[in-house]
Amino acid sequence: MVSKFPLSLYIHLPWCEKKCPYCDFNVTTNIPDNFSNFSKALIDDLEASSEWIQNRKFSSIYFGGGTPSLADPSLHESIIKWLTKNHLAQSDIEITLECNPKETNLQNLNRFMDIGINRFSLGIQSFDEGVLKDLGRNHTYKESYKAIEELEKISSRKTIDLMYGCPNQTLEKAAKDIEVFSKSNIKHLSYYQLTLEPNTVFYSRSPKLPSEDEIEAIESACKGILNNKLFSQYEVSSWSRGNDLSTHNLNYWNYGDYLGIGPGSHSKISIEEKSIRFTKLKKVSSYIEDQAPKLMQSIEGNELDMDIAMNFFRLKNGPDVEKIETYLQLSNEFLNKCKNAQKEGLLLKDKLVPTQKGFNYLNELIALF
Ligand SMILES: C[S@@+](CC[C@H](N)C(=O)[O-])C[C@H]1O[C@@H](n2cnc3c(N)ncnc32)[C@H](O)[C@@H]1O
Ligand code: SF4
């Protein structure tokens, strides 16, 4: 039977000019002069994935990284063309490209728009020179401002990433970041608290971070400014003005399927009452040789309930029930756990919507599954 789960595509492009000391993504600074071997591997990977795609049309494509804007647009174009040729792209498909400020200029944005990219996600992180330096970024505050100016000129959808809880970041600096952003015409923000991830430079040599109280104060003040500027939070780290939400990420949180291609990418495909998860080899040279799924896992029972809960309840208003009913049959066990969460005041009565307490204490809510 053909799967009714909506399907999105994630493509990992792992190159960065410089590795940031807090970053644990699969990244390399070894940028090739020629992307043709890599491009062929991505197409081979897609061609070998019919078992997972099952003739479904993709609702979104996300070029993530790394810094996908560093690779030549012909690489991205070959993927989009392959999907179109094989009738695997929905007519209203969202195609996002992650960019770093250094490559964000009008000429580059136009080149990417010409090949079909219709949403840009820009990693600004901060508009403060000291914060950027302490984060070990390869761009300056002037480049942050310039990139925003360039992005404002185009009509495509756009979003930026900002971080808080950064080394030496004061409340004033964090609030200024939000003020600057909210004056732009960009209607979507991903707002992340800096986390110290194992296997990063910051993890082994932690810089001086704001205290927990300071981070709480930053979070509360900055969220207040966003609300005043008519932004609303729709997910743990996602804010939007109007209804400019990320189709791609909503598919993750509504427990849709996704196929990952590229080194170290992850996939989740639902088959009957199970979720199949797998990854691809992490090293670029290994991936070019072998794109077969690795570390395949089947998730079912309690583990599946928790997996679903971890996605659903990141959404402030819970999952899109009308939509998920068309593809996902929630088990009685899952629904009973929801009833417990309702009794504990972590979910709204008779709804799959977290209460304010449930949203604030997400780990407690998820632990009930
Ligand atoms: C894969 S990065 C891609 C964007 C681009 N390469 C960049 O860094 O500007 C996606 C986003 O994750 C966030 N991020 C990365 N490492 C993080 C960490 N340790 N804690 C919190 N956010 C992090 C950053 O905001 C970053 O923009
Ligand atoms: S630019 Fe982005 S992906 Fe690259 S190392 Fe820095 S945070 Fe990681």
Image (cartoon, rainbow, N blue to C red):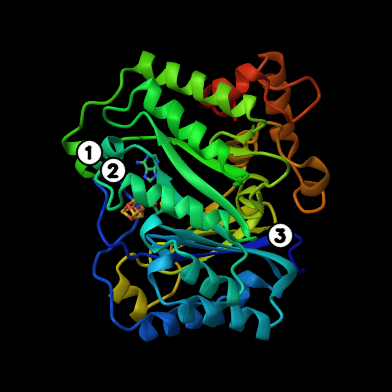
Residue at 73 percent across and 23 percent down: it is 339
The tag earlier along the polypeptide, 1 or 3, is 3
Quarter of the picture containing the N terminus is bottom right
Up-down relation of residue 27 to residue 318 (above or below): below
Up-down relation of residue 168 to residue 297 (above or below): above
Do the residues under discs 2 and 1 have CB atoms within 8 angstroms?
A: yes
Q: Disc 2 residue type?
A: Tyr
Instruction: Name the residue that disc number 1 marks.
Output: 202
Q: Secondary structure at mark 1?
A: helix
Q: In the image, residue 124 lies at what x, y percent?
A: 42, 47
Instruction: Name the residue that disc number 3 marks.
Output: 6
Instruction: Name the residue that disc number 2 marks.
Output: 22
Q: Is mark 1 within 8 Å of ligand 1?
A: yes
Up-down relation of residue 87 to residue 225 (above or below): below
Q: Disc 1 residue type?
A: Phe
Q: Disc 3 residue type?
A: Pro
Q: Is mark 2 within 8 Å of ligand 1?
A: yes
Quarter of the picture containing the C terminus is top right
Front residue of 74 and 354: 74
Q: CA distance from mark 2 to mark 3?
A: 33 Å
Front residue of 5 and 100: 100
Using a 10 Å C-alpha cutoff, classify the residue at mark 1 as few (fewer than 14 neighbours), some (14 to 19) or many (20 or more): some
Using a 10 Å C-alpha cutoff, classify the residue at mark 3 as few (fewer than 14 neighbours), some (14 to 19) or many (20 or more): many
Q: In the rendered view, does 75 fall on the left or right side of 85?
A: left
Front residue of 164 and 181: 181
Q: CA distance from mark 2 to mark 1?
A: 5 Å
Q: CA distance from mark 1 to mark 3?
A: 38 Å
Using a 10 Å C-alpha cutoff, classify the residue at mark 2 as few (fewer than 14 neighbours), some (14 to 19) or many (20 or more): many
Identify the image quadrant of residue 189.
top right
Q: In the rendered view, does 313 fall on the left or right side of 146?
A: right
